[in-house]
Image: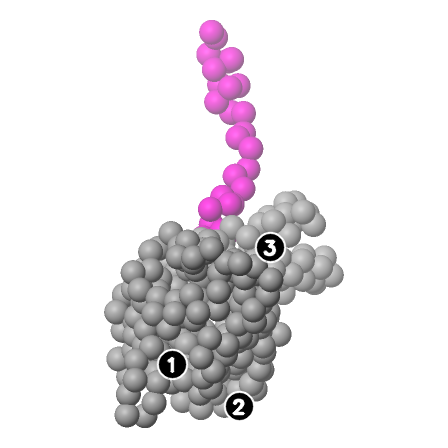
Amino acid sequence: MSADATDHITATPSPPRRPHLAWTFGAGALYGLLMRLAFALPMYRGQGGASGVMLASFVFLVPLLVGALSVYLLPAAQRTLGRALVAPLVPVLVFVAGTAILLIEGSICIALALPIFLGAAMFGGLLGWALLRIASPSRSTVGAMLALPLLFGAVEQSTPLPDRHGETDASVFVAAPPETIWHLINDATAIRHEEMAQGLAWRIGVPFPQEAVTVDTREGRVRKLRWDKGVHFDEPILDWVANRYIRWRYVFAADSIPSGALDEHVLIGGRHFDLVDTSYRLTPEPGGTRLAIHVSWRVSTHFNAYAGAWADLLVGDAARTILAFYQRRAEAAAVPWP
């Protein structure tokens, strides 16, 4: 090859380098993780209303801004509508994975938050795409927008939490007499994981139950519950009609739920979620018994529509799983029913 040819090849300019997508995704994920750490600071952990990551300012605004930031950092030539909707999903997933790896967030909170995080991020990407088509914000403007969750969160935490109460009903036919089912409701022991494994709540991290036993105390009959991870609590019985109807409320002691057993934001009996009472009604039918469950619950957040939908889904699924548990055990233990 001649020297002229070599010089020509050497002189050929290389194509301009584009910003690597890893920077775009990494910046969005880092922003989300920094916001998660910031909302854990004492100044965002108020005592009366919402606090920390249960603030709507975090739950909705942070992933929205992660989405908008991801689109802002894309090269202008790559800011298509499709990328604006899809690109924000990557930094959100990396951010959420980071909270799990660093043990900042538990599996239950991640499962409950992920749908709204992904939806808000996509909306933020769409909003950023639309705004960038008509304006070119400066870096200082973008920086100010990224600080909005902290500003709104400081104001939001002083806003009282509204309560939303819900009720869940389910029933199952059991080919067994009421007496057999009644005994199981008041003396369910040696509960195996596989007997409850189909329940969604247990699949996302709620500790598995071990036993539920009714005992007599000075205050009256109390159902004693024990779960995995050292969880234990009482269910004082409010109504009792032997073999026909039982209703109880829930009482949690200071040591009922050991640290790490449940995500602090979804503690039963906590600031944001509680079970009010539960009842079972046993109605004889030809060939067996109709077993019905009724559960009253409460959620208290600044996004009760979303939290209530999750509570309704999880409590309803758990109720059906428990009914199926009693159905299997009662039918296996029952004598032939006329």
Circle 1 crowding by C-alpha within 10 Å: few under 14, some 14–19, many from 20: many
For label 3, the residue is 71
| Residue 106 picture location, percent across and down | 37, 63
Is 24 included in the stretch rendered in magenta? yes
| Pointers 2 and 1 in contact (C-beta within 8 Å) | no
Is 281 situated above or below 84? Answer: below
Is 171 included in the stretch rendered in magenta? no
| Residue 55 picture location, percent across and down | 50, 77
Question: What is the spatial separation of the Cα atoms under label 1 and label 3, in whole angstroms?
Answer: 51 Å
Type of the residue with mark 2: Pro
Whichever of callouts 1 and 3 sits on the residue coming sooner in the sequence is 3
Question: What is the spatial separation of the Cα atoms under label 3 and label 2, in whole angstroms?
Answer: 35 Å
Depth-wise, is mark 2 or mark 1 nearer the camera? 1
Question: What is the spatial separation of the Cα atoms under label 2 and label 1, in whole angstroms?
Answer: 29 Å
Circle 3 crowding by C-alpha within 10 Å: few under 14, some 14–19, many from 20: many
Quick check: 239 left or right of 256? right
Quick check: 184 left or right of 159? left
For label 1, the residue is 235
**Secondary structure of the residue carrying numbered label 1:** strand
Whichever of callouts 2 and 1 sits on the residue coming sooner in the sequence is 2
Magenta stretch, overall SS: helix
For label 2, the residue is 160
Type of the residue with mark 1: Glu
**Secondary structure of the residue carrying numbered label 3:** helix
Depth-wise, is mark 1 or mark 3 nearer the camera? 1
Type of the residue with mark 3: Val
The magenta segment is 1-30
Whichever of callouts 3 and 2 sits on the residue coming sooner in the sequence is 3
Q: Which residue is depicted at the point 57% across and 82% down?
A: 165
Depth-wise, is mark 3 or mark 2 nearer the camera? 2
| Residue 74 picture location, percent across and down | 58, 50
